[in-house]
Amino acid sequence: MPDKISVVDVAREAGVSLGTVSNVLNRPERVSAATRTRVQEVIETLGYVRNEAARQLRSGSSRTIGLIVLDIANPFFTDMAKGAEEIAEAEGLSVVLCNSGEDRTREAHHLSLLREQRAFGVLVTPMAARTPAIEEVRRSGTPVVLVDRGSGRAHCSVSVNDRVGGELAVSHLLALGHERICFVGGPRAIRQVSERLAGARAAFAAAGLNRDALQVISTAGLNVAAGRAAGSELADLKAGKRPTAVFCANDLLGLGMLQEMTRRRLRVPDDLAIIGYDDIDFAEAAAVPLSSVRQPRAELGRAATKLLIDERNSPDHQHRQVVFEPELVVRASTAGFD
Amino acid sequence: MPDKISVVDVAREAGVSLGTVSNVLNRPERVSAATRTRVQEVIETLGYVRNEAARQLRSGSSRTIGLIVLDIANPFFTDMAKGAEEIAEAEGLSVVLCNSGEDRTREAHHLSLLREQRAFGVLVTPMAARTPAIEEVRRSGTPVVLVDRGSGRAHCSVSVNDRVGGELAVSHLLALGHERICFVGGPRAIRQVSERLAGARAAFAAAGLNRDALQVISTAGLNVAAGRAAGSELADLKAGKRPTAVFCANDLLGLGMLQEMTRRRLRVPDDLAIIGYDDIDFAEAAAVPLSSVRQPRAELGRAATKLLIDERNSPDHQHRQVVFEPELVVRASTAGFD
DNA sequence: CCTTCGTTGTGAAACGATTCACCGTATGAC
DNA sequence: GTCATACGGTGAATCGTTTCACAACGAAGG
């Protein structure tokens, strides 16, 4: 049980005042080289480790950023986290990943914990557009950046233009000659889903087709199982009635769809072309590499962190809404063989 | 900029002493119902939020567990993290996920940060068997539990019996009648890889076959790309010379292998049966659902967290090495169609 | 020789919660 | 009426840093 070493002990041992030890730690240039090295040696031999709690109590602010995501098991979010970490680390901050698991209560719990810790700031992919707990965090002076969910002017936010993404996906399918196209996704309450659908419809309209000609299958979630279920529904249709292409609202749906087609002996893309959304790594690694709409996942995390740091540091901070443009990635699942 | 509310303010406003406020917060049963509710109302209206740094400074211990993993993007680790979170939450602790990214320096950095924070404890999947930074954390009184890497008696640890896992996988392939079997994995320095290979050889021996009849392809890493490369190597062989089954050291390799087979128009499992390891969710969701050896991912996290809490709480704690048994999961990639 | 700096170093005063020895008051037993 | 006990409540001391006004001392300028 050592670890009872404080600056006072170091000071005594080195024959200096505790203020000097603190200076060695935080503003080494104000200390003469001789004493500096002496103090550092003592720190070394005594095995002194700074107590972060005391530091934070005195200085009033913490050096941790909270990042609350909907699902820690979704590669999209972990990639985003890596981006955030990258920027934070360069700034001497650290990121703690909090998993809300798409549960409102857990989300609120994490927010409250971060408030108690006087976090440097919070990055959050919220469940709902307006979350009281988030407003509270704001009000108590902790900057908040909304991620992947652009909103009003009340916060900084970063997001990707989902409407354009939907257009890209469906325009691509139309260009390949597909006409019977189906959108697969849900629940519609999730803004991203409805925006992507809106984009898909816009692409139909732009091609001079009736917007309503786009079929839609609503799913309960955005996971692999839901994709399989939707796939089964499509596979049951007669070949002449079946869509020739589907646009899935995310890659997990797309992968489920692909799996079901393989199971039913339908060929992708010959019998059914599939395009997903997000471009997670597993999309490329699928048995039939999945076309997708790429979101700059890591960049999203980087940008959000930068906004957060700016909000904290620059006094005349203006809230900004950063919107990225998505990018079409064509692979075998829509391109034909090889 | 509010948030300057401390217990003192609450006490003044409620007309009680600050000790009483603290009691309301921490030992409500010692306060009469009347004053308790009054204080709670004041807390509410003033928007008081406890300062965790001060609490920790005084009480000397933090309520956060650090979990350092090799790769935050690997579903295996995020599932483990979920298990750890589950136990921690029930105990009023929280888990912060730290990503070492298979980088020694980052690992050390995270350990040092956790030390400064006087973390409740540390769960770590270390890079190397002996890591000085881990010993330092230990020595400063912070309990450490090694995860997924059983070691000597110096620490608590949880792991899975990889040798048995290897036996299970290869016995399964042998039982299906396969005789030309290949092990795919690497680098060999990773204990898990060599143990799984040893298990595979043991299965050969047990079947009365020459241990060395097992072919081996060494890969540079345990990711999808490496699996594809190994798959390409196999696909180049003549059908008569090619193994009829492969055992991949993890699922990412297996998925890469599967993808390459599909690309080369080889059927799984008819032309090549594939079994992976870990049983991540994407294994089941693959185009040909992947047989695998299941590790109790969440249970690993749960057990590790329990050991940590025990080490911290019970005075006569004995280090324990918990070893789980793996489980064979048969799916289409080895079972034949449907 | 006296001032004025500049450089180093000092140590007391915060920061905000928890703890603990202690103090009234009421209740009830004797 | 006295004493023991229990219950509610008090507030000073404490945790380990950082900060800041100030001191000590030598050098430079007048």
Image (cartoon, coloured by chain):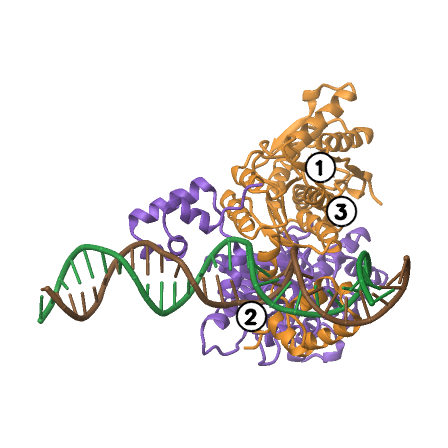
Chain colours: A purple, B orange, C brown, D green
Q: Position of residue B94 (x, y in %)?
A: 67, 55
Q: Which residue is mark 3?
A: B288
Q: Residue at x 63, y 76 (%)?
A: B12
Q: Quadrant of residue A124?
A: bottom right
Q: Is residue A129 visible?
A: no
Residue nearer the viewer, D16 or A290: D16
Query: Are the residues flagged by discs 2 and 1 in contact, CB closer than 8 Å?
Result: no
- Residue at mark 3: chain: B
Residue nearer the viewer, A147 or A242: A147
Q: Which of the labelled discs sits on residue B34, or is there none?
A: none
Q: Residue at x 62, y 70 (%)?
A: B7
Q: Which residue is mark 2?
A: A325
- The local crowd at label 1, few if under 14, some if 14 to 19, many if 20 or more residues have their Cα within 10 Å, is few
Q: As shown in the figure, which amino acid type bears the numbered disc 1? A: Asp
Q: Which residue is mark 1?
A: B316
Give above or below for D27 relative to A316: above
Query: Are the residues flagged by discs 1 and 3 in contact, CB closer than 8 Å?
Result: no
Give above or below for A224 relative to B77: below
- The local crowd at label 3, few if under 14, some if 14 to 19, many if 20 or more residues have their Cα within 10 Å, is many
Q: Residue at x 56, y 47 (%)?
A: B100
